[in-house]
Amino acid sequence: MFAFPAGDPSFPRSRALPAGLADRVRPATPVAGRTLPVPPALAPLFPAGSLRRGTTTTVAGPPGHGATTLALALLAAASAAGSWCAAVGLPDPGVVAAAGLGLDLRRVVFVPHPGNGWAEAAGDLLSGVDAVLVRPPGRARLTAARHLTARARERQAALVVLLEGPSAWPEGGDLALTVGAVEWEGVGQGHGHLQRRRAEVRVSGRRAAGRVSECSLWLPAGSGAVEGADERAQTGMGQTEMEGRGPAGAGPDDGPEAA
């Protein structure tokens, strides 16, 4: 695992990767292989059952609803298969929990505090790794979103964007995953401990072929990994019905516009 702490002089003021790092994290998978694997429980969320190179996937949800867990899980199978990944803008990535999700921490570069240079850091890393997860500090500017989307397409890397609300990424994504209602299990009447979190995940976007589907996932399950909560997926659900099933009292907080 590589990590760049706050105040590291090489990020974000330097536009180049630290000396020697680019060679060490050069993609292990030939670009001719146009997809990256995802955990089996997440495969039904993707049209081809995998994360396609050159595409942008957004993962949105209110804090505490499992969006970070879902976003990190998207990198798990790829890192375990030998691909290099990066996570930008996660101040406390929770490496123990990340390892429980299946991430190979030996193949993940963490840039937890990129500051206002989050887009530059993510863009630089897209040149040298197979997949980049980035969390903007607020609503991203359209120019930054377009730059990273184009960079991922040009370098044939997968871009995953973690958001508190879908509108925080003005460019949209090839695939959009939105975490809705959640329910924890394991806590009784004043006793017990949290064991697993069930979440409703909606899938939409250009690569969803115009269809909206919803499935239930454990984010995470009792094992620490992401697992399917049932075999059922609802397709073609209307927007009004979906809004009615969102988390009670929760609304996206896009925050201040980020550079």
Image (spheres, rainbow, N blue to C red):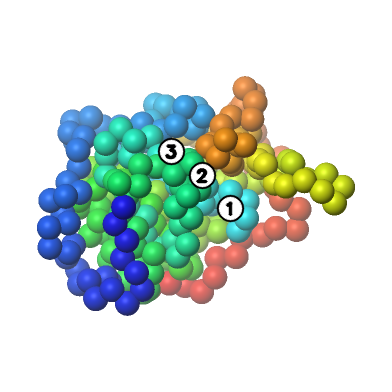
Q: On the picture, is 63 further left or further right than 163?
A: right
**Residue 178 in the image, given as x and y percentages of width and height:** 56, 46
Q: Amino acid at mark 2?
A: Leu
Q: On the picture, is 55 further left or further right than 203?
A: left
Q: Which residue is mark 1?
A: 61
Name the foreground residue: 239 vs 176. 176
At x 71%, y 50%, the residue is 247
Precedes in sequence: disc 2 or disc 1: 1
Q: Which residue is mark 2?
A: 70
At x 24%, y 48%, the residue is 129
**Residue 221 in the image, given as x and y percentages of width and height:** 60, 36
Separation of disc 3 and disc 1 at Cα?
A: 21 Å
> Contact (CB < 8 A) between labels 3 and 2?
no
Q: Which residue is mark 3?
A: 102
- Mark 3 residue element: loop
Vertical comparison of 73 with 230: above or below: below
Vertical comparison of 192 with 122: above or below: above
Precedes in sequence: disc 3 or disc 2: 2
Q: Amino acid at mark 1?
A: Gly
Separation of disc 3 and disc 2 at Cα?
A: 12 Å
Pair 3/1: label in front: 3
Name the foreground residue: 52 vs 105. 105
Quick check: can you spot residue 198? yes
Pair 2/1: label in front: 2
> Contact (CB < 8 A) between labels 2 and 1?
yes
Name the foreground residue: 140 vs 96. 96
Precedes in sequence: disc 3 or disc 1: 1
